[in-house]
Image (cartoon, rainbow, N blue to C red):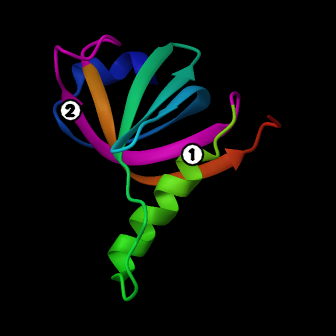
């Protein structure tokens, strides 16, 4: 649950919930993930406009960027990533840098 994350040390976590908002900026994407206990900021460095011959890792990062950009409000997702405590984050002082994202149930836009 989101409310329990602040007690955990920085490191790998898996969280699930529904998408409240997506802010898709030029260099970074933010997703506000919510569950019944609260809200959490997810962050992804955006990868766009790949060159020909891009590595598999770069292609996976670009696919993640595209997936995040297409998320609709209310979509259920499961995210694995790196938990980081940062007092600058307004939502409880924690955020998760996305490593993998799975769409569990898609909401219609």
Q: In this view, does 64 lie above or below 92?
A: below
Q: Residue at x 24, y 15 (%)?
A: 93
Q: Position of residue 5 (x, y in %)?
A: 32, 24
Q: In the shown orientation, is residue 86 left or right of residue 81?
A: left
Q: Which residue is found at the position 60% from the left and 41% from the top? A: 77
Picture coordinates of residue 36, whole percent (x, y): 59, 15
Q: Which numbered disc flags the more N-terminal residue, 1 or 2?
A: 1
Circle 2 is placed at which residue position?
Answer: 84
Distance in Å between CA atoms under marks 1 and 2? 22 Å
Residue 20, picture quadrant: top right
**Crowding at mark 2 (Cα within 10 Å: few <14, some 14-19, many 20+):** some
Q: Where is residue 57 in the image (x, y as percent from the top left)?
A: 34, 74
Residue at the location (36% across, 38% down)?
43
> What stretch of residues is rendered in magenta?
73-93
Q: Foreground: 23 or 98?
A: 23
Q: Is mark 1 on a helix, strand or loop?
A: helix
Q: Please give left or right for residue 68 compared with residue 62 in the image.
A: right
Q: Name the residue under label 1.
A: 69
In-image side of 71 versus 25 (left or right) = right
Q: Which residue is at the far bottom?
A: 53
Q: Residues within 10 Å of mark 1 (few under 14, many from 20)?
A: some
């Amino acid at each position: 649950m989101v409310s329990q994350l602040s007690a955990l040390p920085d490191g790998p976590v898996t969280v699930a919930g529904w998408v409240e908002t997506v802010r898709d900026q030029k260099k970074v994407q933010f997703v506000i993930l919510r569950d019944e206990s609260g809200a959490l900021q997810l962050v992804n460095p955006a990868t766009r406009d790949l060159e020909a011959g891009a590595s598999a890792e770069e292609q996976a990062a670009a696919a993640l960027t595209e997936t995040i950009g297409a998320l609709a409000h209310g979509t259920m997702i499961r995210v694995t990533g790196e938990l980081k405590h940062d007092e600058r984050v307004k939502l409880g002082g924690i955020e998760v840098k996305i490593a993998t994202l799975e769409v569990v149930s898609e909401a219609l836009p």
